[in-house]
Amino acid sequence: MSKKAQPTKFNKYVRWFWLILILPVLLLLSIILLVATGVFGDLPKFEELENPKSNLATVVYSSDMKVLGNIM
């Protein structure tokens, strides 16, 4: 092996190391940026999350199909 082949192989590993290290961070930051700008839709306000206005409820049935209660 020549001496020039060694640094090239080492540089290849260093490049892959940084690519594997930085790529997930960049991907996460880009997803956060897309969500913050509203690309996937608007985010609800804190008031809407704390006080949901929903008339939907979960109905709990017994094994003989009698209503035990509603959970809102």
Image (cartoon, rainbow, N blue to C red):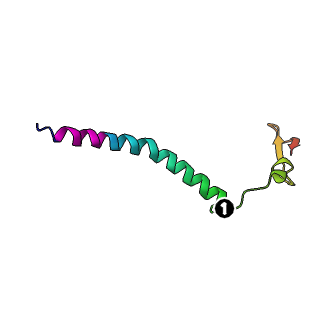
Residue farthest toward the left in the current orientation of the protein: 1
In the shown orientation, is residue 72 left or right of residue 40? right
| Quadrant location of the N terminus in the rendered image | top left
Q: Nearer the viewer, residue 32 or 6?
A: 6
Q: Nearer the viewer, residue 53 or 10?
A: 10
- Give the residue at mark 1: 38
Q: Nearer the viewer, residue 18 or 50?
A: 18
Q: Is residue 28 magenta?
A: no
Q: Is residue 29 above or below residue 6?
A: below
Q: Is residue 10 magenta?
A: yes
Binning the other alpha carbons within 10 Å of mark 1 as few (below 14), some (14 to 19) or many (20 upward) gives few
Residue at 87% across, 44% down: 70
Residue 4 lies in what quarter of the image? top left
Q: Secondary structure at mark 1?
A: loop
Q: Which residues make up the magenta segment?
A: 5-13
Q: Is residue 30 above or below residue 71?
A: below
Residue at 72% across, 57% down: 43
Q: How far from the left and from the top, in percent, is residue 8?
A: 22, 43
Q: How far from the left and from the top, in percent, is residue 29?
A: 56, 50
Picture mark count: 1
| Type of secondary structure dominating the magenta stretch | helix
Residue at 85% across, 43% down: 71
Q: How far from the left and from the top, in percent, is residue 38?
A: 66, 61
In the shown orientation, is residue 48 left or right of residue 28? right
Residue 15 lies in what quarter of the image? top left
Q: Amino acid at mark 1?
A: Gly
